[in-house]
Amino acid sequence: MTEKAPKPGQDAPVCRRLVGRVAVITGAGSGIGRAAAHRLAAEGAKVVCADLDEPSGTAAAKEVGGLFVHTDVTDPYMVEALFDEAYETYGSVDVAFNNAGVSPPEDGSILTTGLEAWRRVQEVDLTSVYLCCKAALPYMRRHGRGSIINTASFVARMGAATSQISYTAAKGGVVSMSRELGVQFAREGIRVNALSPGPVDTPLLRELLAEDGERAARRLVHIPLGRFARPEEIAAAVAFLASDDSSFITASEFLVDGGISGAYVTPR
């Protein structure tokens, strides 16, 4: 008898594709990062949770029986220490989910976004990915295998009149950097992909939309599935890209956006 597919909000059956693997997740204290920590641990991985928020990061690590490392992803020394501690504790770094990011309200139109806000988003959303990839790759090269998953966004391929100029530019950079690294290290058994979610029901999005309910409604109308993604749905894509089921996928942008980037007119 075939098992029915779960409805949104229900838990899907989980495979055990990551037994013996070690996964490092930045931004693991909440949202997509926390959901990914749970999913990768459920699939058998040893999980290292990195976050700037110590209480939430510690809680996430405790929930999945993993290791918490307090990390500011914009600090190269802390990033190096994160991957060093993961390797020293568990003996390898097989998966790096470079997920930490910000989307502050100060980042809007290019006409109103100040240089300080621009630089802050670039540091957290793009430079941190560069730092994490640079720190993870030597450990993966030692073992001749690895999967790096960098969180980008559907905004990297679509323009918006309600702009977040620095966020959009940073996510475009993540896609391009992931493509180049995926090509460069493919012959060494290391895959690098950009994961581009659509709007996800996370604390970050709720904070962004909290002051303007109409803004949320305007976004929903453009999503063919008619809702925001759940963090668990993005985590499922992370698990796929981390596993050998995606062994022939590298240098790619993996869209999980509810159809938003493919839509011209959406259903009412």
Image (spheres, grey):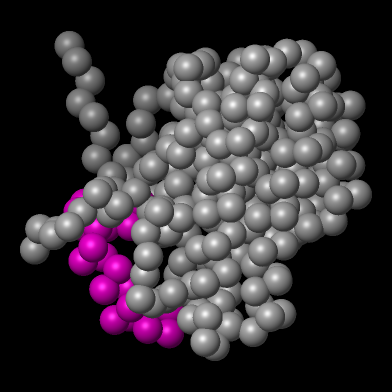
Which quadrant: the N terminus?
Answer: top left
The x and y percentages for residue 251 are 53, 31
Name the residue furthest left.
268
| Left or right: where 186 falls relative to 220 | right
The x and y percentages for residue 252 are 48, 33
Q: Is residue 38 visible?
A: no
Which quadrant: the C terminus?
Answer: bottom left
Q: How many marks?
A: 0
Q: Residue at x 46, y 39 (%)?
A: 253
Q: Is residue 181 visible?
A: yes
The x and y percentages for residue 99 are 61, 48
Asked if residue 211 is among those painted magenta in the image, a careful observer would answer yes
Which sits in the foreground, 196 or 169?
Answer: 169
Asked if residue 44 is among those painted magenta in the image, a careful observer would answer no
Q: Which residues are magenta?
A: 210-229
Name the residue furthest bottom.
112
Q: Quadrant of residue 46?
A: top right
| Left or right: where 237 falls relative to 213 | right
As drawn, 120 above or below 109? above
Q: Residue at x 24, y 58 (%)?
A: 223
As drawn, 37 above or below 172? above
Q: Residue at x 29, y 48 (%)?
A: 258
As drawn, 213 above or below 268? below
Q: Residue at x 58, y 19 (%)?
A: 18
The x and y percentages for residue 41 are 60, 29
Q: Quadrant of residue 43?
A: top right
Which secondary structure dominates the residues rendered in magenta? loop
| Left or right: where 43 falls relative to 120 | left
Which sits in the foreground, 81 or 19?
Answer: 81
